[in-house]
């Protein structure tokens, strides 16, 4: 590579590094800063000129050879991953960040180290405020429960019972029977199902039917937060465990005597998954930075929108955690696999919104029923509920018509097919060809462009469908 090329590559890399959301700080093997991007400069409140070309310890006098992760990585050659720290920056602002530091090797020699960090001050504040709110809510509710003794429904946020779980499909009925049986125990449960299939509804119903029903029901989404923050949210912290930490209860303690739901467990950072094994085993854990072992009685439930075995295969879910959670596993079938429930649910939702909006809608037209049966409902029961809510805002007469439906649902359905309008001007062969094309396109759309799924639905071998796509000039990117 000639110098010109090297310079060009350098410019490309610098542009990229200057426009990521993460702070990047790179030092060479002498501890001198060689790169310091804009985000880093904003986070630390320092101008790049103050940092570039100078030694780390000169720029950050409070750091030492031991406490600077960049220098440590330079010495050990080993990365330091997912750490959290709070510091007061040059402008006097307290910044909490997560960071990882990596060694940089060139031809087997360590030539520098690179620090990548993310400012999580705001989400940390928000999640702590949420924790405090939850704690004070739980505190208050306990008092209320005592006052209104005999209130059967759970006051802590689990509002659904098995009566709310509608459906006549044999799989739903079997699922309900199984869930009612496991509700009586405290075994961990893993619930798997696509988005909107009713996982949380089922889990709340289990909680309300189980021995911990008078205790709290707490759900925490595992996808939204970085590992270090989630860890302190679950386990709590003691003052001084890391800079900026306070004495704070975590969700395990708050959910004591109740149920804790790990929502979207397949999105939980894997390093944190390992830390859950112990508390799942015997209910004991330590707050972060604490020596005291605490014990809680919490029923653990986890949900995943990915097939758990696939999640294990793709390393989104640790195998050992999967075994612990999978004591009882329940699968919520997608709506398209239980077409018999579509109109039943639609009817129930119409009733619900009739009451809510003071309407007297009787049902849907034949055409809308056809559309409902044809549509694939990728958002499952939630999408159906939203669709009815939308229509109930639009409807004037006693029946929901096609024009009252949300646009994305009508769009999926080919009008020519529904009305049986066939253009015969080009002769029978041409009409059949265009009908075939229409059917394939609409099936593909319903399957979100997934050829294998569409082939199964059309009962064609995949290769045959591929051939037809080519032959009929169907371009998938145009769907
Ligand atoms: N069998 C059912 N009967 C009645 N309502 C249902 C049923 N299943 C789901 N719902 C309704 O559908 C909506 C979505 O359900 P829920 O929040 O439990 O889905 P989820 O599987 O947790 O979805 P996500 O993966 O997106 O979190 C809720 O309004 C719920 O009341
Ligand atoms: Mg959910």
Image (cartoon, grey):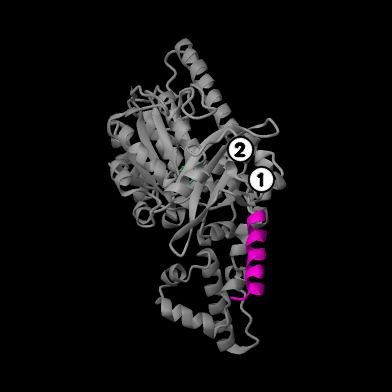
Residue 4 painted magenta: yes
Image quadrant where one finds the C terminus: bottom right
Indicate the secondary structure of the residue bearing disc 1.
helix
In the figure, is residue 80 to the left or right of 186?
Answer: right
Q: Is residue 224 above or below residue 368?
A: above
Choose the circle earlier in sequence order: 1 or 2. Answer: 1
Which range is magenta?
1-18
The answer to whether one can see residue 224 in this image is no
Q: Residue 454 appears at what percent x and percent y?
A: 46, 69
**Number of disc labels:** 2
Between 73 and 267, the one lying in front of the other is 73
- The disc placed on residue 51 is 1
Q: Which residue is mark 2?
A: 60
Residue 397: horizontal and vertical position, in percent? 68, 47
Q: Quadrant of residue 284?
A: top left
**Separation (CA) of disc 1 from disc 2:** 9 Å
Residue 466 position, x and y percent, is: 47, 79
Confirm whether residue 417 shows in the render.
Answer: yes
Q: Residue at x 58, y 51 (%)?
A: 26
* Residue situated in front as seen by the camera: 218 or 417: 218
Q: Quadrant of the N terminus?
A: bottom right
């Amino acid at each position: 590579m000639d110098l010109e090329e090297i310079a060009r590559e350098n410019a490309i890399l610098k542009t990229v590094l200057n426009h990521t959301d993460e702070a990047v700080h790179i030092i060479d093997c002498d501890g001198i800063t060689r790169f310091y991007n804009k985000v880093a400069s904003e986070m630390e409140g320092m101008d790049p000129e103050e940092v570039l070309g100078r030694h780390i310890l000169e720029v950050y006098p409070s750091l030492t050879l031991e406490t600077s992760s960049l220098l440590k990585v330079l010495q050990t050659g080993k990365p330091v991953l997912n750490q959290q720290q709070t510091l007061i920056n040059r402008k006097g602002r307290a910044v909490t960040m997560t960071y990882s530091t990596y060694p940089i090797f060139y031809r087997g020699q360590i030539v520098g180290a690179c620090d990548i960090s993310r400012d999580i001050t705001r989400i940390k504040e928000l999640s702590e405020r949420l924790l405090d709110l939850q704690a004070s809510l739980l505190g208050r509710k306990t008092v209320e429960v005592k006052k209104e003794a005999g209130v059967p429904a759970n006051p802590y946020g689990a509002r659904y019972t098995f009566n709310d779980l509608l459906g006549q499909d044999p799989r739903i009925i079997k699922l309900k029977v199984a869930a009612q049986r496991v509700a009586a125990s405290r075994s961990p449960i893993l619930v798997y199902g696509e988005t909107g299939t009713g996982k949380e509804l089922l889990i709340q119903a289990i909680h309300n039917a189980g021995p911990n029903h008078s205790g709290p029901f707490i759900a925490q989404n595992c996808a939204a937060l970085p590992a270090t923050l989630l860890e302190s949210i679950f386990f709590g912290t003691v003052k001084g465990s890391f800079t900026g930490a306070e004495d704070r209860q975590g969700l395990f303690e708050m959910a004591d005597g109740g149920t804790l739901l790990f929502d979207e467990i397949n999105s939980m950072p894997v390093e944190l998954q390992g830390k859950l094994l112990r508390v799942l085993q015997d209910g004991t854990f330590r707050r972060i930075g604490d020596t005291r072992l605490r014990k809680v009685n919490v029923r653990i439930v986890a949900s995943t929108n990915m097939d758990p075995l696939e999640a294990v295969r793709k390393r989104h879910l640790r195998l050992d955690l999967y075994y612990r959670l999978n004591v009882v596993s329940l699968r919520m079938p997608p709506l398209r696999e239980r077409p018999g429930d579509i109109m039943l649910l639609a009817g129930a939702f119409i009733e619900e919104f009739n009451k809510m909006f003071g309407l007297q809608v009787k049902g849907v037209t034949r055409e809308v029923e056809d559309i409902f049966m044809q549509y694939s409902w990728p958002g499952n029961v939630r999408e159906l509920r939203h669709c009815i809510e939308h229509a109930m805002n639009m409807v004037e007469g006693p029946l929901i018509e096609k024009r009252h439906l949300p646009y994305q649902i009508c769009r999926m359905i080919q009008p020519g097919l529904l009305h049986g309008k066939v253009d015969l001007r080009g002769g029978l062969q041409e009409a059949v060809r265009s009908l075939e094309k229409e059917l394939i396109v609409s099936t593909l759309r319903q399957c979100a462009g997934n050829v294998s799924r569409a082939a199964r639905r059309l009962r064609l071998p995949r290769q045959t469908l591929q051939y037809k796509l080519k032959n009929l000039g169907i371009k998938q990117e145009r769907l």
